[in-house]
Amino acid sequence: MRCKTLTVIAAMVVMLTAGCSTLERLVYRPDINQGNYLAPADVAKIHTGMTKQQVAFTLGMPMMQDPFGSDTWFYVFRQQPGNGALKQQTLTLTFRQDGVLTNVKNQPTLN
């Protein structure tokens, strides 16, 4: 009788603690990376006056372009660590009509 009682109590304790955050860290969750990885050294090479071809050679093609024209490029990198906070970095490049870079806006990593 005592063995059954201990088994039931042990099963109840396991079920009640299954949702605790300490046990959540034991479960493997893969890191999820999406978008264009932006190395700081590559971003530092970008400056106004460059052509679209030069930017594409340095950073690769953008993840998104302006849907109403091709004068704005968006490089977005999102990283979701398995048990951590979401981080996002966005680099926005604006070009003139003739394809010359006029504005560089680098939003730092957001947590």
Image (cartoon, grey):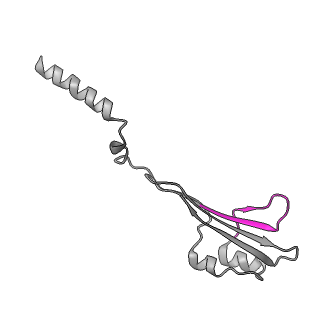
The quarter holding residue 60 reads: bottom right
Instruction: Name, please, the residue furthest toward the right.
Output: 97
The quarter holding residue 94 reads: bottom right
Question: Is residue 3 found left or right of 46 in the rendered image?
Answer: left
User: Does residue 80 sit above or below 100 in this rendering?
Assistant: above
The quarter holding residue 39 reads: bottom right
Residue 73: percent from the left, percent from the top? 75, 67
Residue 106: percent from the left, percent from the top? 65, 70
Quadrant into which the N terminus falls: top left
Give yes or no for residue 32 being in the magenta stretch: no
Instruction: Name, please, the residue furthest toward the left.
Output: 2
Stretch of the chain drawn in magenta: 61-77
Residue 31: percent from the left, percent from the top? 48, 56
Question: Is residue 73 found left or right of 98 in the rendered image?
Answer: left
Q: Residue at x 78, y 77 (%)?
A: 101
Q: Residue at x 81, y 79 (%)?
A: 100
Instruction: Name, please, the residue furthest toward the top.
Output: 1
96 and 53: which is toward the camera: 96
User: Does residue 65 sit above or below 7 in this rendering?
Assistant: below
User: Does residue 6 sit above or below 106 in this rendering?
Assistant: above
User: Does residue 40 sit above or below 83 in this rendering?
Assistant: below
Question: Is residue 87 found left or right of 93 in the rendered image?
Answer: left
Give yes or no for residue 62 being in the magenta stretch: yes
Number of marks drawn = 0
Residue 13: percent from the left, percent from the top? 26, 30
Question: Is residue 59 found left or right of 68 in the rendered image?
Answer: left
Q: Residue at x 62, y 80 (%)?
A: 44
